Amino acid sequence: RMAEARYLVPTSLGCYALVSGRHGGRALQLLPWVLSEPCAPEWESLASQAAKVWKLDMHDAQARLSDSVRKGYLTVESSSRCLPSESFEQHLANLLASWSPQGRGILLDHRGLSLAVAGFDEGLTDALAALSAKLVGALSHEETTLSRVLGVEHALPCVLDVANKVPICFFSMRIGPQQITAVVVGKPRMKGPWFRDIVWLLWRRYGGQAS
């Protein structure tokens, strides 16, 4: 039944698993191929690519695709999805504004330079880059403790704006060889297309670059 469906579209779960580096396995190996394309690929096309690259017969290649779908990393749709044709920076800014419940966010590259801004003063980039590096680094260092003591498997460092009762969250993403940090005001909307499309757009630009 799955093989009759036409297109394989990345999911927010799959994108999170890929960029957070906390999940692995063969089911995730297909996702970078999908994210490298401007439009979701057809099932048969991706199965043929997998068979060729991994030297599999088509039955085994189809099984790999089915496994990725079962684990929620890819979903099957009857029509393709494509990234909008608007400019890279404008598209990222629009996605950030929708990903944040407050319409405010910023994406920083590994040098602390702004890739996209929504609702923030560009002059705050340096300060946010320094703060995010400290917070993300501290959380990464204590991941084992969080898991063992508190049972927390997936966490984002956040600063609570007590007066406005709004968290400001810092999310580090590994996009191929690049480390990119998102600063989002409010609890990021992980259910929906915004995070997926941010990762998709960033992967198209940076995922295949050499470090």
Image (cartoon, rainbow, N blue to C red):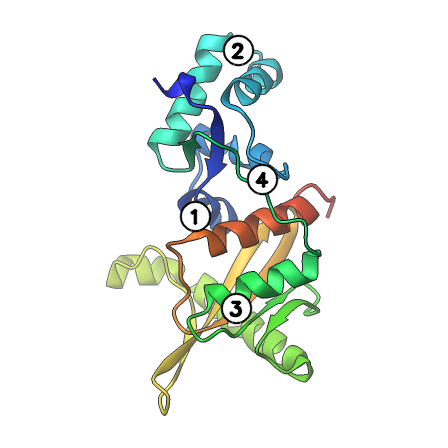
Q: In this view of the protein, can residue 137 be seen by the observer? A: no
Amino acid, disc 4: Leu
Q: Closer to the camera: disc 3 or disc 1?
A: 3
Between marks 2 and 4, how big is the CA–CA gap?
22 Å
Quadrant of the drawing holding the N terminus: top left
Q: Name the residue under label 1.
A: 12
Amino acid, disc 1: Ser
Q: Closer to the camera: disc 1 or disc 2?
A: 1
Q: Few, some or many C-alpha atoms within 10 Å of disc 4 (few <14, some 14-19, many ≥20)?
A: many
- Is the residue 36 above or below the residue 132 in the image? above
Q: Name the residue under label 2.
A: 56
Q: Mark 3 points at which residue?
A: 97
> Image point 50% across, 22% down: which residue?
43
Q: Name the residue under label 4.
A: 35
- Is the residue 189 above or below the residue 71 in the image? below
> Residue 48, position in %: x, y?
57, 15
Amino acid, disc 2: Leu
Q: Tell me which label, 3 or 1, sits earlier in the chain.
A: 1
On the image, which quarter does residue 122 sit in? bottom right
- Is the residue 190 above or below the residue 11 in the image? below
Q: Tell me which label, 3 or 2, sits earlier in the chain.
A: 2
> Would residue 142 appear left or right of 40 to someone viewing this image?
left
Q: Is mark 1 on a helix, strand or loop?
A: helix
Between marks 4 and 3, how big is the CA–CA gap?
21 Å
